[in-house]
Every structure is written in structure tokens, then in C-alpha cells.
Amino acid sequence: MVEILECRTLVKLLVLCHLIFSVAVSKVEGRIRHYRWDVKYEYKSPDCFKKLVITINGGTPGPKILAQQGDTVVVELKNSLLTENVAIHWHGIRQIGTPWSDGTEGVTQCPILPGDTFIYKFVVDRAGSYLYHAHYGIQREAGLYGSIIVSVPNGVSEPFVYDYDRSIILNDWYHKSTFEQATGLSSIPFVWVGEPQSLLINGRGRFNCSLLATPSLEARVCNMTNPDCSPYILTVIPGKTYRLRIGSLTSLSALSFQIEGHKMTVVEADGHYVEPFEIQNLYIYSGETYSVLIKANQNPSRNYWMTTNVVSRKPATLTGLAILNYYPNYPKKSPPTLPTAGPLWNETAQRLAQSLSLKAHKNFTHTPPLTSDKVIVLLNTQNKIDGVYRWSLNNVSFSLPHTPYLVALKENVNLNRIFDQNPPPENYDFENYDIYGVAENVNATSSNGIYRLRFNSTVDVILQNANTMTVNNSETHPWHLHGHDFWVMGYGTGKFDIKKDVGKYNLVNPIMKNTVPVHPYGWTALRFRADNPGVWAFHCHIESHFYMGMGVVFEEGVEKVGKLPSSVMGCGETKGFHSP
Ligand SMILES: *[C@@H]1O[C@H](CO)[C@@H](O)[C@H](O)[C@H]1NC(C)=O
Ligand SMILES: *[C@@H]1O[C@H](CO)[C@@H](O)[C@H](O)[C@H]1NC(C)=O
Ligand SMILES: *[C@@H]1O[C@H](CO)[C@@H](O)[C@H](O)[C@H]1NC(C)=O
Ligand SMILES: *[C@@H]1O[C@H](CO)[C@@H](O)[C@H](O)[C@H]1NC(C)=O
Ligand SMILES: *[C@@H]1O[C@H](CO)[C@@H](O)[C@H](O)[C@H]1NC(C)=O
Ligand SMILES: *[C@@H]1O[C@H](CO)[C@@H](O)[C@H](O)[C@H]1NC(C)=O
Ligand SMILES: *[C@@H]1O[C@H](CO)[C@@H](O)[C@H](O)[C@H]1NC(C)=O
Ligand SMILES: *[C@@H]1O[C@H](CO)[C@@H](O)[C@H](O)[C@H]1NC(C)=O
Ligand SMILES: [Cu+2]
């Protein structure tokens, strides 16, 4: 088989070579989707306020990856950030057989150095709506993200029909740099950046420049007529049905999304078909994707607001706005109404109800194993270590090693020098922990130990929420598992009861997902099969929370992993392994 790397050396023949390669393999294993990305800092004004953002080929969000099930995606990524490392995670792609392409710095690869070009190569093995984003420090917040759309194979139909397909990425946006924010998170005293300045819909938002201390002096920095921040406009043809693929990559916020005057029917979640249900507002957590169908069946002579607003935290951010426009009428005109107010931020019961409504489509149900081999309860708490604010699981706050686990474990280097060989606590006494109060002693410990799972065993993870270090406060955490989809076995409020709650699991039609929220003072139960050889992060998708230790790492079947490309090595204890 022709190797893509060989193609690369024939610079002049690249296109031809690529074509031959694509044709040669198209029958057997899908096409190659080749992308060349240049990642760099540029001045942009996504919400009218000019700041340094990370772009891919000049844009944020970056280019949309379009592929068909079975295709191989090749992304040749050049790090042109000059003074900053980078790594990109392909969120929702399981990386079966290519765990080194997961893009998780410290877990599956060394960071990509400034000036270096790194090649990600992986198969998109299941149709659906996915995302990609930076996975190094809190770099995602600088604007390094985009979407991946995988279509069904030719001749295969989906359990719903639509005329057009559009994608919408939601994000929250800060004016402070990632460096300033990260430094604040690890400072004594703790420096918190606060609520985001704006919400972005497809990379566009609107910050009210009059809110700056000296608006007239800052007019060149914050300019509300800058075309960068004109709202996203979705133009629809009257009578047609649209599939909106909606993803969220917020750094902090849980969101609600709604379209004035239009109901939405949920049909897909994280690449799995959903038993359809109709909603007025979609609750969406960072790292999740949904497809909803909307019918363009309203009065076409006016425009409608599409809005997104913060839920779960007391909002201090203006509603994000976009416009739904009926062809061929006034595309740029603001709707005649005031933007629809979303649901109240503290309607936790409604959000739990929507989580519970998500069931696998009856024709696409994957029955979960009826029992599990291992149960891991993870108590989610906010803590301090040596006076620094942290998040912990079972009183242990996660820290990344300097040498990626995958490389360390696969190359049999001296593991003791790389990470703590004790696994995280397996039988932590969460039952006697008061989840409603602030702990008397908020100190926790730190570790980079990992869970080593028996290959192909069935693992249950129960996420148990609790109070933070603030009285009467519990936050929503969206948990994301790399390398797998899991079955969502159940949600509950209060303390998980191992005796009673296991009996209430949905064994009939649980949805499979890769990201799921644990609601305030509640629990969420997941089940997955440890059948993907590799080392996989499982973490809260709030950028600052993972940075502050809210994650764990699972290893399974690492001995079955194929030969690692040397491009993932070169840092820490693997310096010597970096050979061309
Ligand atoms: C589900 O499967 C049944 C039986 O094969 C079929 O009749 C029905 O049309 C399918 N429903 C959808 C929505 O695909
Ligand atoms: C922007 O803020 C100013 C000052 O608070 C306020 O008077 C104005 O109405 C705001 N404009 C918008 C569009 O929200
Ligand atoms: C604001 O942006 C508009 C449109 O790009 C431009 O014409 C105007 O000069 C800008 N104002 C300032 C103060 O830079
Ligand atoms: C929700 O928050 C509002 C203030 O933002 C408050 O008035 C209301 O009582 C709260 N509702 C619940 C159910 O806590
Ligand atoms: C928590 O840790 C700090 C130092 O980081 C220490 O001063 C304090 O005594 C500890 N608290 C308890 C209750 O152990
Ligand atoms: C967490 O660990 C710290 C440090 O070892 C200890 O002082 C504290 O009591 C532990 N807290 C809980 C709730 O287990
Ligand atoms: C994994 O376990 C399942 C169910 O027990 C079994 O059907 C399958 O063959 C196993 N796969 C491997 C690779 O061991
Ligand atoms: C916390 O909640 C409890 C129970 O609802 C209430 O009695 C108490 O006053 C609240 N405390 C604060 C500081 O809000
Ligand atoms: Cu979190």
C-alpha cells in the first residue's frame, strides 16, 4: 500500500499521488481526506473585541472536516505558534487501532513543538457529528476548535429525513488570554476570570463595547461594526426540513439553545440515533453534540432569533444571538421581536428531565452488558492542595506526567520515574461523605496514578456530585471519555445508593454517548467495555476544571497497541526515542 508519508516527499506530485492513492484504496477502506493546517496566532474580533486568537488556516472555528464513514482522515498540522506547543484531540472519534492519534498531550503524545509538523491519521468508523479541539493546557479557549461531520455510507439511510444539513458550534468567550487565566487558576490567592464576556454561535458573538471602562479610547479594540462579529445567519427555504448539528465547546458554561417560533426534534446525540423527541430548548454541555430537525414552516416574511444562554451558573453573560432568515427575504434584518429569554438558569429539574429523555432509537439500540466486572465511584469535589484551588476525584487531584502514559507504558521505560504506580483509590468511602456541605478539611492530595483495566472487562463509573467549597453550591460537570462510547445507565439526585440504584439502570435502550453531565448534587452512572487498546483520558470538559485536576486515566490492553510512531515521542523520558 502507498504510504501517505512517501506521497508527502514528492511535493510536486502531491496532488497526483494523493489522487492515485485515494482511487487505489477507495473500494476497500474508504477515501483519504487530507487536510493541511497551519496553526497560528492572529488578531480577531469574534465578539467585536480584538484579541489574539489561535486560528487554523486563518479561521476560528477552524475548517470543518467532512468525511464518510470508513474514510481515513489525515491532518498535517503545522505549529506556527512560534512560542507555544500544541496538540489536537478528535472528540468522539474512538481511534480504534490508532490510540497515538488521540491528540491528548501528556496521555497519548508529546506536545507538537513550534515549527514542527505533526501528522494525525485515523479512521472515522461511525457516521455522526463530532468535534475537534486543542488538548494542551487550556489552549482550547484561545479559539482552536471545529467540527467533524461523518456521513453514512452510500446506500445506507438514517432513521429520519431532511433536506439540508447545517452545523452550529456554540462557545463561550473570554477577553483575557489563556496564559493569564491559567496563571490565575494556580495562583495564591486564587484569581478567577469570572463569567465569559460573550457567547459565540459559529464563532460570532456580540460584546457591548460601551461596557468597557473607556469605550471611546478603546474604539479601535472594540468596534461593534466590525464584520468579524456580525451575527451568524442561517437562511432557510420555506417548507424545507433542516438538520442542525449542534455542538458545544464552551470552556465553562452549560448552555440552552433555542429558535424563536420553531420546535426542534432531537434525532442524534454524540454520533448515536435518538428515539426522537420534541423540545423548545436544547440543553447542551461542553463536549456534547446533537442533531435536531427543524421545519421552516413559519411566516417567511420576517426573521427569527436563534439564541443561546448560560444555565447552571448564575449568568453574567449576554444571550448569544444568531438569525434565522427565510429565503429570499431580508437576510440581515434583525427580527422584529426582542430575543427570546431562555429557561431560568437554575431549573435543574428541567435539565435532569431532558437528560432522562435521551434514549437510543428503537432501530439502533446497542444492548449493554447486563452486569459489570468493576464499579468505580468518583466523588467530584473542589479542594485545595498547598493552598492552591483544585478539583478532585475521591480526594485525589489529577496531574499529568511529563512523559505521556502511552509512550511510557508501550516503550517499557522505567515507569516509576514517570508516574505514580499506585492506582487511584478504588474503594473510597463516598457513602460517609456529606455531599451537601463544605468539607471541614478541604485539603486533598495530588497524583498521576492511573486505573489499569482488565482488557475487555465491563466497567461501571458512577459520577457522584457534591458541594463545592462555596456554601450551597454544586456545579454541573460534563464528563468526556476518550476512546469509547459508554452507555448512560442512569441519573439520580442525591447520594448514589449502590444497593438500590443499580437495580434501576436502563438495560433496555440506554443512549450511548461520549460526554455526559453530572447534575448538581446528583449522580450519573455509565457503563463501557474496556476493549480499545490504549490509554484514555476521562475528564470534566470544563477547561479550567481538567486543568485543576478533574480527570482520571484508564489503561487497557496497552500490550496490544501497535508500533508507536516516533512523532508522538521526544519529551520527558522519551527524548532519546525521537528518531526521524
Ligand atoms: C424501524 O425498523 C422497522 C422494521 O425494520 C421499519 O419498518 C421502520 O421504518 C424503521 N423506522 C425508522 C424510523 O427507520
Ligand atoms: C450597552 O451598554 C450600555 C451601558 O450600560 C447600555 O446603555 C446599552 O443599552 C447597551 N447596549 C446594548 C445593545 O445592550
Ligand atoms: C469600526 O469598523 C468599521 C467597519 O470595519 C470601520 O469602518 C471603522 O473605521 C471602525 N472604527 C474604528 C474606530 O476603528
Ligand atoms: C432561581 O434564581 C432566581 C434568581 O436568579 C431566584 O429568584 C429563584 O428563586 C431561583 N429558583 C430556584 C428554584 O432556586
Ligand atoms: C491544609 O493544608 C494547609 C497547607 O497547605 C495547612 O496549613 C492546613 O493546616 C491544612 N488543613 C488541615 C485541616 O489539615
Ligand atoms: C483528603 O486528603 C487530605 C490529605 O491527605 C486529608 O487531610 C483529608 O482528610 C482527606 N479528606 C477526605 C474527605 O477524605
Ligand atoms: C470481549 O467480550 C465479549 C463479551 O464477553 C466477547 O464476545 C468478545 O469476544 C471479547 N473480545 C475479545 C477481543 O476478547
Ligand atoms: C443553605 O441552604 C440551607 C438549606 O436550604 C439553608 O438553610 C441555608 O440558609 C443556606 N445557607 C446559605 C448561606 O445560603
Ligand atoms: Cu467540571
Image (cartoon, grey):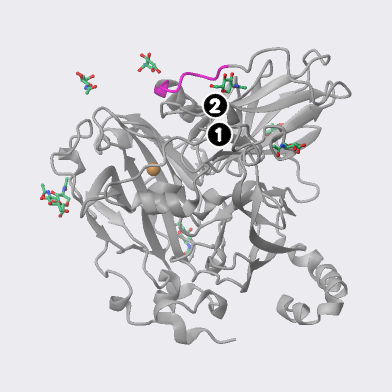
Q: Left or right? Give the position of 478 relative to 363.
A: left
Q: Which residues are magenta?
A: 341-348
The answer to whether mark 2 and mark 1 are in CB contact below 8 A is yes
> Which residue does the numbered mark 1 point to in the structure image?
198
- Three-letter code, disc 2: Leu
Which x, y percent locates residue 46? 64, 41
Name the side, left or right, on which 252 lies relative to 26: left
Q: Nearer the viewer, residue 85 or 450?
A: 85
3D distance between C-alphas at marks 2 and 1: 6 Å
Residue 31: % across, % down = 77, 63
The residue wearing badge 2 is 318
Q: Of the residues under marks 2 and 1, which one precedes in the sequence?
A: 1
Compared to residue 306, the image places residue 53 above or below, namely below
Q: Quadrant of the N terminus?
A: bottom right
Q: Is residue 282 above or below residue 423?
A: above
Report the residue at 37% width, 49% height from top: 184
- Say left or right for 233 vs 477: right
Instruction: Indicate the amino acid at tag 1.
Output: Ser
Give the quarter of the image for residue 521.
top left
Structural crowding at the residue carrying mark 1, measured as other residues with C-alpha within 10 Å and reported as few (<14), some (14–19) or many (≥20)? many
| Image point (77%, 14%), residue name | 298
**Residue 549 in the image, given as x and y percentages of width and height:** 34, 53
Q: Indicate yes or no whether the magenta region holds residue 546.
A: no
Q: Position of residue 423 (x, y in %)?
A: 27, 63
Q: 57 or 428, which is in the foreground?
A: 57
Quadrant (top left, top right, bottom left, bottom right) of the C terminus:
bottom right
Q: Which element carries disc 2, helix, strand or loop?
A: loop
- Please tell me whether the stretch drawn in magenta is mainly helix, strand or loop: loop
- From the Cβ of disc 2, is ligand 2 less than 8 Å away? yes
Res 540 visible: no
Which residue sits at x=67%, y=39%? 202
